[in-house]
Amino acid sequence: MTADEVLRMLDLLETHRIRVWVDGGWGIDALLGEQTRPHSDLDLSIVSDDLDSALALFTSEGFETLRDDLPTAIAMRHPDGREVDLHPVQLTPDGGGDQIQPDGSLWHYDRPVTGSIAGRDVTCLSPETQVRAHLGFEPRSEHIADMGRLRDLFGIELPGPYGTTN
């Protein structure tokens, strides 16, 4: 997925007043202010109240459900290959949000921050939330590189499998 495609999707969502935060690999690149690697999809944390509107919008744009793990996440794919992975969050008083996990527990997103994709400001996950979101699974090489970049730019101490990266 290209940066232009990401920005077009974000514009479409904004036009329909659907509130999202860029998550995943694009979210890390937004924090870094540059695209560091190719991305196959766009991960978005979406305000739960806006989920039905987003699903209807993406469906009207030709997207079909790829994987439905609601209430935790739903992934959709367009026939042209674009994919979007939506992570519903219920807004919390601290400006962040809680996501229902498969076991019913809540996972907390800190207040989002501003990053940049292709020179344009976007709302994205904070560096600290990104690090927490990359725990609990065996990281691939791109995850290790992403976490190292966040550490280098933001001075974040990395836990677990990332703490020994160079």
Image (tube, rainbow, N blue to C red):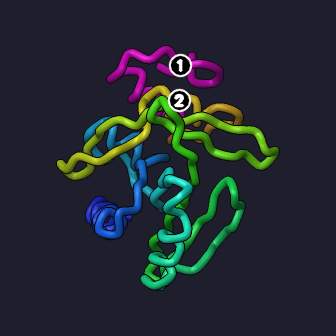
Residue 64 x/y as whole percent? 57, 80
Dots 2, 1 in contact, CB < 8 A: yes
Mark 1 highlights which residue?
Answer: 158
Q: Residue furthest front?
A: 93
47 versus 137 height, above or below: below
Mark 2 highlights which residue?
Answer: 131
Residue 80 sits in quarter: bottom left
128 versus 10 height, above or below: above
Badge 1: few (under 14), some or many (20 or more) residues near its Cα, within 10 Å? some
Residue at x 79% of width, y 45% of height: 104
Q: Residue furthest left?
A: 119
Report how far apart the C-alphas of labels 2 and 1 lie in the structure.
7 Å
Q: Main secondary structure of the magenta part?
A: helix
Residue 70 sits in quarter: bottom right
Residue at x 58% of width, y 53% of height: 88
Q: What kind of residue is marked 2?
A: Val
Residue at x 77% of width, y 49% of height: 102
Residue 38 x/y as whole percent? 40, 55
Residue 40 x/y as whole percent? 47, 61
Badge 2: few (under 14), some or many (20 or more) residues near its Cα, within 10 Å? many
| Stretch of the chain drawn in magenta | 144-166
Residue 53 x/y as whole percent? 49, 71
Residue at x 65% of width, y 37% of height: 107
The kind of secondary structure element at disc 2 is helix
Q: Is residue 1 left or right of residue 76?
A: left
